[in-house]
Image: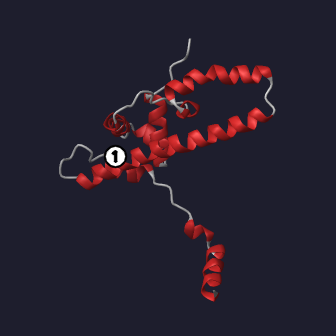
Amino acid sequence: MRCLILMLGALLVAPAALAVEALSTEELVSHCDKFDDPNAEKDRIFCVRYIQGFIDGAVATDERVAQNIVEEYQKDESFSERAARTRIGSRLDRYGYTVYADYCLGDPVPLREVVEHVVAAIENEHLVAANPLARDLVYQVLRRDYPCALEK
């Protein structure tokens, strides 16, 4: 019991030790720039898995955030607010919750295709410099290359 209290106390004193350091764009580039090198399997895997993890995480959190927002608005929603929300429904059905993040993967897009877009983007020095965190670079590529079509 005493050991448990000491461990909990140590965790409270050093919360920064538990924080996850964001991956830099520079580090992602160091792996993804070897994507076409057949001898760099570990780098290729790192590149692909980071991008896949970004997308999986975004889909999971976007869906939960959207559900929380809907629950909040449904508490005091007016007729016009409900009408506006249900009009968005078809976009949600078509693209999923990432529509709120300004990118739409829609029908299943091959992961390799998305990775190739990110790999191509790392050659753009301006885009890399403007996004020091890897997550921001991947997000910008998704927004640029997978825009949501406007509903008519």
Depth check: 142 or 5 in front?
5
Q: Position of residue 35 (x, y in %)?
A: 27, 45
Which quadrant of the view contains residue 107? top left
Depth check: 11 or 122 in front?
11
Q: Position of residue 134 (x, y in %)?
A: 45, 48
Which quadrant of the view contains residue 6? bottom right
Count of numbered marks = 1
Q: Measured along the vertical axis of the image, is residue 17 above or below residue 95?
A: below
Depth check: 76 or 56 in front?
76
Which corner quadrant holds the N terminus? Answer: bottom right
Q: Position of residue 116 (x, y in %)?
A: 32, 36
Asked if residue 131 can be seen in this view, the reply is: no
Q: Find the residue positioned furthest to the top.
A: 152
Q: Is residue 111 left or right of residue 145?
A: left
Asked if residue 12 can be seen in this view, the reply is: yes
Residue kind at label 1, given as amino acid type: Val
Q: Measured along the vertical axis of the image, is residue 94 above or below residue 60?
A: above
Residue at (53% x, 26% y) in the render = 93
Which corner quadrant holds the C terminus? Answer: top right
- Residue under label 1, please give it: 48
Depth check: 28 or 109 in front?
109
